Amino acid sequence: MTVFDTLRARFGARFSTSDALRVQHAGGEAHHRIAAPDAVVMARSTEEVQEVVRLCAAAGIPVIAHGAGTSLEGHLSAVRGGVSLDLTGMDRVLRVSAEDMDCTVEAGVTREALNSWLRDQGLFFPIDPGANATLGGMASTRASGTNAVRYGTMREAVLSLTVVLANGEVIRTGGRARKSAAGYDLTRLFVGAEGTLGIITEVTLRLHGIPQAISAAVCRFEDVESAVAAATAVVQYGIPVARMELMDRGLVAAVNAHSGLDLPVADMLAFEFHGSDASVAEQAALVGEIVAEFGGQGFEAAHDAPARARLWKARHEAWYAILGQRPGCRGWVSDVCVPVSELSGAIHHARGLLADCPVPAVILGHVGDGNFHVVFAMDPESEAEAAAVKQANAAMVRHALSVGGTCTGEHGVGIGKADYLTEEYDPGALALMAALKAAVDPQGIMNPGKILPGA
Amino acid sequence: MTVFDTLRARFGARFSTSDALRVQHAGGEAHHRIAAPDAVVMARSTEEVQEVVRLCAAAGIPVIAHGAGTSLEGHLSAVRGGVSLDLTGMDRVLRVSAEDMDCTVEAGVTREALNSWLRDQGLFFPIDPGANATLGGMASTRASGTNAVRYGTMREAVLSLTVVLANGEVIRTGGRARKSAAGYDLTRLFVGAEGTLGIITEVTLRLHGIPQAISAAVCRFEDVESAVAAATAVVQYGIPVARMELMDRGLVAAVNAHSGLDLPVADMLAFEFHGSDASVAEQAALVGEIVAEFGGQGFEAAHDAPARARLWKARHEAWYAILGQRPGCRGWVSDVCVPVSELSGAIHHARGLLADCPVPAVILGHVGDGNFHVVFAMDPESEAEAAAVKQANAAMVRHALSVGGTCTGEHGVGIGKADYLTEEYDPGALALMAALKAAVDPQGIMNPGKILPGA
């Protein structure tokens, strides 16, 4: 009996080799090449994941964990075939402690589902990559997003994990204490490992109290450079803004069209402030003064919750808004992150590249962290466009690396950034990563071809 | 020529096998057994560390990095002999960026030296374990201390590291971007690894702006339980206190005697508030209301910087204050950390143990994190006292583990907590840690006998 026969016998209709389901599990949302897995298993528990991994390990078959499928760097592409383990059925919130402000969820719970669950307890989970990703996927890519500037990334948010290793063992990486000095940081080993070291099945997360007051503001600028300079000043002043997002005028126009907003079409910063009434008012006043120094216009803090929700929903739909402007196009998004002092230079450099690039593109960014994205709307049939975008992306990465930055602030390596990893790290560091991979997954069956394609 | 001959020829007077220097490098500050290294090398650069590691690796000789020697869990004990690599001569601040609020220092820079260096730039490094430890040592033990409740631990503070691996390679674990999703988290692999995976020679750290306003307050309570309940309420209210320390009445008496203070002798909480003038005033007012609900007396926020400095200096000298009360005694300090909701129960449990223990002891704690210490002042000649303390410590650890906590919040494993690690983690997780160790240090020469004594 083959492994697939065994899986079919065990999982029934939750095992499939149908073309439709395989193609649905073949890739993420961006431009990377699609490679469908040989089969899909819809798992419902850690024990089921363990069973699948053990069967696959015994046969040397690759296993690729699959959440919401919102990856942007080809993490889900089954480049060596194998089984896609779909965890979206593992969608239970297992435990919430309002007293400790933490919770444990199955890997397939999405961030929106978690926040809906938490709302009536006065708690929220702040990390917000835009897409309604699963928490297992967010942990695996070390995701962050619009309010990392205040609340950190998945690196800080994850307290511990349950992981199925390549050898079929199930481990807990830690407990529920807020801090621990007890041995190697297994939690951080798996956060950002993109499923190449094991499959995350449960996530214990730090939560935050919903702030007493929240307000938002937008502010338009003469040009992108002025907006970035103002954002940098806000960071350096130490104002604990909860969000501070750059949207260039092209993005604002796209967002207006897609989401029915009527924002003034200009390069702008969008802010959100969290805290007590007094603190939110103080933050907004300080930011208002700073942006004015950089020529910011129309800054006004608004407490209107529906308007705020519309603004951030529109921002989160930026990807679809941009792609919607060029019917039939395919998106490619860059993701460099640089020290904040280098952000202005990096964005200026990127704008120079875009001026020479024939592909429509917009710039947006989590500017408080030094992380920005260029979204290109490519003609999928045009090799010339693909080549131009690839070249511009490479130039942005190399500029970022030259100023102490990274090729990926939050989207991860997948297959899209693997080549740049070898430029970002020295050979000794890369060899160490390969040694870790070999120690944890000696057969190389866990999401092969990602991060370290040769490992 | 032996390795030691080679080292002597290379390092001259900076290589020593003298008894005095060896004994000085034999242990930390607590009760653990002392084992002197066979030789000491005073290194002055990453290249020198690399040379020593390569020579020792070729001969299979253990290498133990040594900073300020303030370890509390026997990390420095040369249980298998070898070379102590003293890094205190690597004391240069290599780079400070006020704009990016980060810096790079050599591993031997102490936190007090760094803060002196930073002061006139309006910046500070918040992590404060009390002892004037080196930043390499603090990274290696994943240290934290009195203001982790606001600023996090070394896990969050370290942006990247330069590390000499067991194979003699020098690697950089990352860049200077505030966040990155580029591959395995090598930085966090070494933070908390206690020198067992490599030797940290340079540390890049996140800094913070010196707050516009700082105020402090002390508040006395009827008993420890009331103080802990008040502290828990402050955390759950989400007030961003910068420090919130529990000191029981025995500790307050010792601190008064040692540091010439005149604090009222009572179980107390000591607070510090950081922020804008308005924010500090608001935090203090809210905390004042909360502590009053738990019977707190005498709460008053003071902006008097010298008085504040005296308070925290006294708190930092608690270890010496306590030991000073029993001449000739030796200290033993527990270090459990539990979810905040379990803190009250854990401290109540600990107080029950102390009531039955013949050894003088006090309780102090970073209660905002759920981390507390019992310091025992033991007669070093009494086996009965040692046995009683060991038993009480074991009971505290097991209680902490039973409620989701950890055996060490901030002191690390060393040799002191190694036995408990096997109770804290499941066999699969321990096997994974051993696999990591074997992959990175196959000969087992990096600080052997620590964390995983069998590895």
Image: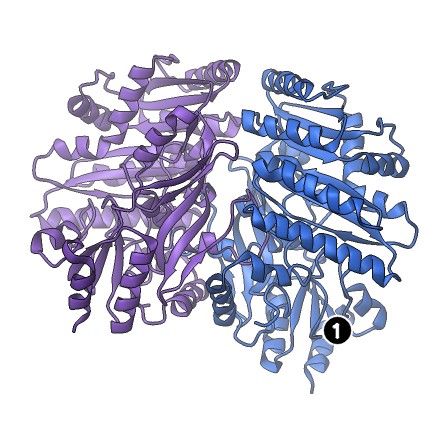
Chain colours: A purple, B blue
Q: Residues within 10 Å of mark 1 (few under 14, many from 20)?
A: many
Q: Position of residue B433 (x, y in %)?
A: 50, 64
Q: Compared with residue A322, is residue A189 higher up or lower down, i.e. above or below? A: below
Q: Which residue is mark 1?
A: B39
User: Looking at the image, which is closer to me, B313 or B96?
Assistant: B313
Which chain hosts label 1? Answer: B
- Residue at 75% across / 30% down in the picture? B223
Q: Position of residue B362 (x, y in %)?
A: 79, 42
Horizontally, residue B412 falls left or right of residue A400, namely: right
Residue at the far right: name it. B327
- Residue at 36% across / 71% down in the picture? A442
Horizontally, residue B9 falls left or right of residue B274, namely: right
- Residue at 62% across / 53% down in the picture? B398
Horizontally, residue A348 falls left or right of residue A292, namely: left
Horizontally, residue A423 falls left or right of residue B408, namely: left
User: Looking at the image, which is closer to me, B289 or B222?
Assistant: B222
Q: Taking the image as drawn, is residue A292 in sight?
A: yes
Q: Position of residue A400 (x, y in %)?
A: 38, 46
